[in-house]
Image (cartoon, rainbow, N blue to C red):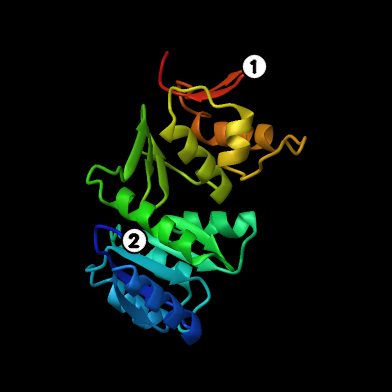
Amino acid sequence: MVYDSIMHILLIEDDQKTATYLGKGLTESGHVVDHAADGEDGLHLALGGKYDILVVDRMLPARDGLSIVRMLRADGNRTPVLILSAMGDVDDRVEGLHAGGDDYLVKPYAFVELLARLDALARRGSCDDLPVRLCVGDLELDLVRHKVVRAGKPIRLQPRELRLLEYMMRNSGQVITRTMLLEQVWDFHFDPQTNVIDTQICRLRSKIDKDFDRPLLHTLRGVGYRLDDIA
């Protein structure tokens, strides 16, 4: 599969066999590939800002992949990042996304899937109006630095709470069901029959609504939840 648009890709991968395989496949697909074999070299190249997309292995010598992504985001670099890792648990993937990764692909993977994911990230990254901040009323979420502020007051959230809030802010004003939260925030495609959602919603509400005059997080009994600033 060869794409119409040529991407300049930085591959940060320490395993030489994997790097050669991916580099050859991406080049044959029409893209230009640079390779860094450790985290420090990869970060140095990535900070140059000349790449359309980054493919970053999570476990790297000198500097791990997630620290690379965090430093890039802290520097304001918004280049799309696909994280590659053998660490495939839900919490591992969530950690990678919260570090600033745009997608997370678990090893082993099919090369055609990697290509498809890169193409999707390239389409998403081509939009100039991607938000870097979400706002609902006086509640703000900085997507780059993962900072939450309401009415000028900083709010500290745990990673799962942050992911929950981001999903709800991206869908503000809409009814969000338990099934939607299970699939999009917890990556469960079944109901584990626990109160995990109720517990997290309660914790999130205590942080973003407590001590403020106007509640933003509403429970619709028997239906789901809604985040909005409607009186």
For the C terminus, the image quarter is top left
3D distance between C-alphas at marks 2 and 1:
40 Å
Q: Is residue 77 left or right of residue 158?
A: left
| Res 196 visible | yes
> Going by the picture, which residue comes out furthest to the bottom?
16
> Label 1 is placed on what type of residue?
Arg
On the image, the x and y values in percent for residue 88 come to: 62, 62
Q: Is residue 199 left or right of residue 214?
A: right
Secondary structure of the residue carrying numbered label 1: loop
Q: Nearer the viewer, residue 95 or 17?
A: 17
Q: Quadrant of residue 223?
A: top right
> Label 2 is placed on what type of residue?
Ala
Tell me which residue sits at (59%, 60%) in the image: 92
* Residue 221: numbered disc: 1
Which one is in front in this view, the residue at disc 2 or the one at disc 1?
1
Q: Nearer the viewer, residue 17 or 25?
A: 25
Secondary structure of the residue carrying numbered label 2: helix
> Going by the picture, which residue comes out furthest to the right?
193
For the N terminus, the image quarter is bottom left
Above or below, 183 relative to 80: above
Above or below, 9 relative to 77: below
Looking at the image, is mark 2 or mark 1 earlier in the sequence? 2
Residue beneath label 2, please?
74
Question: Counting other residues with Cα less than 10 Å from the Cα at mark 2, is it few (<14), some (14-19), or many (20 or more)?
Answer: some
Tell me which residue sits at (40%, 68%) in the image: 55
| Res 100 visible | no
Q: Is residue 6 left or right of residue 181?
A: left
Tell me which residue sits at (61%, 66%) in the image: 87
